[in-house]
Image (cartoon, rainbow, N blue to C red):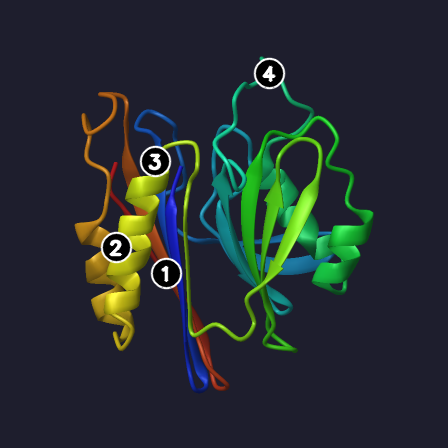
Amino acid sequence: MCIISFYRNEDEFVLTHNRDEEINRSSSKEIAEQKRFDKTYFSPVDERANGTWIFYSEQYVACILNGGIEKPTHFKEKYRESRGIILLDLLKYNSVNEFINSENLSEIAPFTIFVFERTTKNAYLLFWNENKLSVKDVSQEKIVTWCSSTLYSPERRNEIDEIFNQNNELNSEEILELHDDLKMNKGDLYDFLATTSISQIIMNSLRIDMKYCQLF
């Protein structure tokens, strides 16, 4: 599932996430304030697994996509934990490096996590392929984009990367409009699959805010 973009513009940072999912998978209508590992975070809620696909807390701004760097060649019938719970496990740790070195990912389906550390302003892409966790430091990149390897071909992923790179001076509203233009419509791949929501987190030195636009 999913397309993400992260724009870094001086002191403002904007993370936007298209959630491509089964249209009958229920999720919360609003952003919820919750606690995990005694840390407060804000996110929409996946009501099937009680996890999320995007959140922010005092420490992190993060989101998750299905699939790692390459399209998975197989899936098991059952995994130990939902990837939306694994995303929230970041809250266990004081840094992304602690998560990388300590989190148990055995029996977890392939994923990509984007995570921004609010204190250091460092950003990372974490790729899990059921065997190895690979890390890409994107802290120096002005624009970071990624598409789910499960749903998007390498060619289409390159096209989407190029679209974002050609639109590198957008404000948050324009970024949201671009994500809406790129959304997956019902029937593009399957009748049961579409972009079910678009979420955006905007942060600077003074505030942090989240928009959550539910489409199904």
**4 or 1: tag closer to the N-terminus:** 4
Q: Earlier in the sequence, mark 1 or mark 2?
A: 2
Is 83 rendered above or below residue 103? above
| Residue type pointed to by label 4 | Lys
Task: Check if mark 4's residue and mark 3's residue have beta carbons within 8 Å.
Answer: no
Which mark is first along the chain, 2 or 3? 3
| Real-space Cα separation, disc 4 to disc 3, in angstroms | 22 Å
Residue type at numbered disc 2: His
Tell me the crowding category of disc 2: few under 14, some 14 to 19, or many 20 or more residues within 10 angstroms, Cα based. Answer: many
In front: label 3 or label 1: 3
When the figure is inspected, residue 195 is found, relative to residue 62, above or below; the finding is above
Instruction: Give above or below for 30 relative to 56.
Output: above
* Residue where numbered disc 2 is placed: 179
Q: Residues within 10 Å of mark 4 (few under 14, many from 20)?
A: few
Determine contact: label 1, label 2, CB under 8 Å: yes
Disc number for residue 76: 4
Of the residues tagged 4 and 1, which is closer to the observer? 4
